[in-house]
Amino acid sequence: MPRVRLVVAYEGTGFCGWQLQAGDRTVQGDLEAAIGRIVNAPVRVHGSGRTDSGVHATAQVVHFDIPENRADVPWSRALSSLLPDDVAVLSHDIVDDDFHSRFHAVSKTYEYVLWHEPRFVLPQRRAFVWNCGPVDVDAMREAAAVLAGTHDFSAFQNVGTPVKDTVRTLDPVEVLPGLSPQETVWRFTADGFLKQMVRNLVGCLVEAGRGKLSADSVRSILNERDRKAAPATAPAQGLTLVRVLYPGFDSAEAARGGYDHCLGTCGAH
Amino acid sequence: MPRVRLVVAYEGTGFCGWQLQAGDRTVQGDLEAAIGRIVNAPVRVHGSGRTDSGVHATAQVVHFDIPENRADVPWSRALSSLLPDDVAVLSHDIVDDDFHSRFHAVSKTYEYVLWHEPRFVLPQRRAFVWNCGPVDVDAMREAAAVLAGTHDFSAFQNVGTPVKDTVRTLDPVEVLPGLSPQETVWRFTADGFLKQMVRNLVGCLVEAGRGKLSADSVRSILNERDRKAAPATAPAQGLTLVRVLYPGFDSAEAARGGYDHCLGTCGAH
C-alpha cells in the first residue's frame, strides 16, 4: 500500500483539537472522512503530533496508506473540494512505506503571538493572539535564555498521556515583530514538545515580562521539575504549528514558504 | 448634548453589514445597544457610511450625542466590556456639536485583498481575501490607471438608494504586497464611493488581470456608465474600510497606526 504524506493547514478555532474524538469535530476526523470518501474505505491518518483545541497549524504533517490504485490521486486538489474551508492541504507526495510523520520528525516549530495593547484586541486578530497586556520584552528574553538548551521540561508539561522521557532540547527562542506594533511573535523550536509545553513556556515568559518572575526563579522552576510551581498555561488561540522538519523534508518549505507571514510575523517574503 | 466620535474596528464575517435591520445582527445595532446601556436611553449612532455584509473595518468613524452628565465616560474602555469581541472601539473624543461622521468626511480608503493561488486559500486568511486565482497584475495596474481621476462612476454602482451625483474622484490605485506571496492588496482612496463601488472596481480589475478586458474596454465601460456592461461584483470578505479622513482628523492615525498591517499589507511598522 503506497503511503501518502500531506502538509495540512488549519484554523483551530472551530475544532476540538487534532485528535479524533467521538461526537466532536476534530482535524483528524475531518481528514479521515474526506480521504475515506476518495479511497472508498476507512482510512487512519497519523499526524506529527496533536494540537489542542483552538491551536492552529500552517504546516502540520500527516501520513496514511492508500490502495495501490489510488497512488496517482492529486490529493491537494481532490481534498480541497471535500474539506471544509478551515482546513487546507498545501502539499502531497508519496513516501517510503516506513515513513512516519510522528516518529521521524527531527524538530518542530511553533509560533505564539502576544498582543500587548491592554484594552482591546483588533477583532480581525482575536482568533490568533493572546492579549497579555504590556510586558517587558527584555525580561522575557532573559527568561527565555534560561529555558533554551537540553533540560528535563517536566515543570512545563501538563497531565495527560505519560511519557517516559521528559528531556527535550529547546533552541534559543526567537522574538519576531508581529503584524502590528501591538504584537510580538515568539518562535519555539525543539526536537519535540511535551503536552502543552509551548503554552506553559509562554505563560512563564509572560509572568517574567510582568515582573512577577525573575530569570533566576524561572531557572528554579525548571530545575525543580514541578508543574505546580510554574505559571498558568497560556491560551490556545495564540499558538500555531508552523514547521515539522524531517531528514530531507521541511514542511514549511513544502507549504511553499511565506505562510508564516499570514499568521503573525511580518517580514520580507 | 455633547457629541462623541469613535473610531471602530470590526470583523464583518458575523454581521449583516453596518446598517440597522430588524432581526439581523449589524454593527450599528450592536453599537447602539451597548452605548444605550451606558447612557440608559436609546441612542442613534451615525456612521461615516455603510459597509456591506461581510465587509470589515479597521477605522470606521461614528458619532452620537449623549446626555451632558455622560461627557466624561471613557468610551473605548467602557464599551469594550459591553461589545462582542468582533467589534472594538479604538479611540474616542468629544467633538463640536456640528461634526458629522458622514457629511464631513473628506476621503475614505478601502483595501481589497486578492489571493492568487488557484487551488486553496490558507484557512487563517479565508475571511479576509478573495481567491481570484492567477492574474496579470500589470494588466490590472493598467486598467486601474484608466479608472483614476474624476469620473461619473455609474457603471460601478449597484442598485440601492439613488444618489443625485455619481461623480467621484478616485486617487491612483495603490498595489501593495500582501501578508504572503499569494496575496496582493489593492488600496482605493476617493472623496466618496457609490454603493459597492470598490467591489465593482475590483471585479473589473480582476477581469482585466484574467485577460478578458483590455484597459480600453475598461475605459469604454466607464464612459458608457452602464452597470450591465461592467463585470460582476467582487465578494465582500476581501474588503476593509481602513481610513476616513476629515479636516484635522485621520481615523487610521487615531486608531494608532499599524492596524492595516493586521489586515493585509505587509510593511515596516
Image (tube, coloured by chain):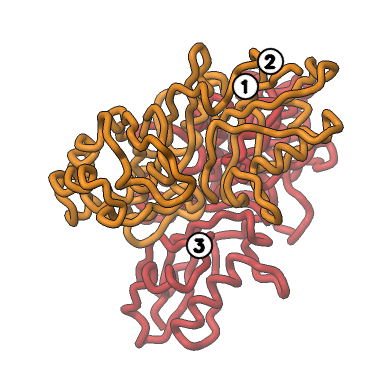
Chain colours: A orange, B red
Q: Residue furthest front?
A: A164
Side of A250 where B137 appears, left or right: right
Residue plotted at (70% across, 56% down): A23
Other-residue count near label 2 (Cα within 10 Å), few / some / many at <14 / 14–19 / ≥20: some
Which residue is at the front of the view, A263 or A54?
A: A54
Relative to A25, say whether B212 is above or below.
above
Between residue A219 and residue A253, name the one nearer to us.
Answer: A219
Q: Secondary structure at mark 3?
A: loop
Report in which chain the residue with disc 2 lies. A
Q: Is residue A98 above or below residue B30?
A: above
Q: Nearer the viewer, mark 1 or mark 3?
A: 3
Q: Position of residue A124 (x, y in %)?
A: 51, 50
Residue A238 numbered mark, or none:
none
The residue labelled by disc 2 is: A94
Chain containing mark 1: B
Q: Which residue is mark 3?
A: B85
Find the distance from the CA under tag 3 to the CA under tag 2: 43 Å
Where does label 1 land, which residue? B137
In the image shown, does A39 or B185 lie closer to the viewer?
A39
